[in-house]
Structure formats: structure tokens, C-alpha cells
Amino acid sequence: MSPEDPGDRRPLRRVSALPAWMVPALLGLAAGLLIPLLVLGSAATLWITLGWAAVIALAVPAGVLTARPLAHQYRRLCVRRLRKTLARLTPEQRLLVLRPLQGDPEPDTRALVQPLLREFGLSTELTPSSAPTGRGDELTAGE
């Protein structure tokens, strides 16, 4: 069912424009900027406060812009190291390491494990069983 389907009764998650941590952070920032101005009340304090606000206004976007690429590169490095470590193991040992991670509740873990299983040629499917034997009272094609 699609999310627009009226028959879909799954609980809706609240979608917010801001992350949960950002509201307290903004309130703390506002208090940190306004309290010195109110307590000291001078023009110099205003300029100091505005200067710190400018530093924060530049530092936050710079951090956001650099954090994602750095995290991506770090993940690639870790996957490369994991791949080298797994390459030294026997196929049975690799399977023992990777198979339990297939059902991990974290989607990132599953997304990391699936390509490694395929790369090392490990089966991700269940082992097929033999056909069940008949009881003797089944219908045949001629009946």
C-alpha cells in the first residue's frame, strides 16, 4: 500500500523541519547572545556578541559541509580494511562472520554486508531441501 492509500493504517511519524537537537541549541545560543547584552548593556558587548554570532554562523555551515564527505571517506577506508581482513579468512569463516549481520536491525549494517557477501561469492539464500516423499494417497496425472 502507498502512503496515500486510505486503507493504510500504519502510524505516521512526525516530520519536523528541524532536528530534535536544534531547538534547544538555538535557544541556548539565543540566551548566550542576549544575556551578556542585557547584563552588561554596553555597545562593546553588542559588538562582541555579534562577532561571536558571526563566527558561529560561519562555523556551523562549514562543519555541515565537511562532515558528510569526511564520514563517507572514513566509511570507505573501514570497508577496505574489513575487505582485506575477510579475504584472509576461509569461505566458511567469512560466512560465520557475515551471515549474522544480514539480519541486523541497522539498515547501514545490512547495506554494508550484502555487497561483501556477493563479492566473496557467499550464498545469501537458504539451502534448498529435497522434495518430500509421497504418502501414497496422492492423485497422479492420469487420475
Image (cartoon, rainbow, N blue to C red):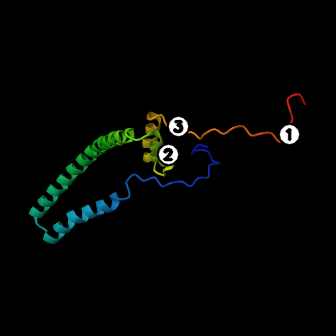
Q: Which type of secondary structure does the marked residue at label 1 adopt?
A: loop
Q: In which quarter of the image is residue 11?
A: bottom right
Name the residue type under label 2. Answer: Arg
Q: Which amino acid does label 3 sit on?
A: Ser
Mark 1 or mark 3, whichever is nearer to me: 1
Comes first in the chain, label 1 or label 3: 3
Q: On residue 99, which mark appears?
A: 2
x and y, in percent, of residue 69 in the image: 29, 41
The N terminus - image quarter: top right
Q: Is residue 7 above or below residue 28?
A: above
Q: Tag 2's secondary structure? A: helix
Q: For the residue marked with disc 1, what is the amino acid? A: Gly
**Residue in front for this viewpoint, 111 or 62:** 111
Mark pair 1, 3: CA separation = 35 Å
Q: Which mark's residue is nearer the viewer, 1 or 2?
A: 1
Q: Where is residue 93 in the image (x, y as percent from the top left)?
A: 45, 44
Q: Residue at x 85, y 39 (%)?
A: 136
Residues under labels 1 and 2: Cα distance?
39 Å
Residue position for label 3? 123
Mark number, residue 136: 1
Q: Earlier in the sequence, mark 2 or mark 3?
A: 2
Residue 143, how many percent across, how many down?
Answer: 90, 31
Residue lying furthest left? 44
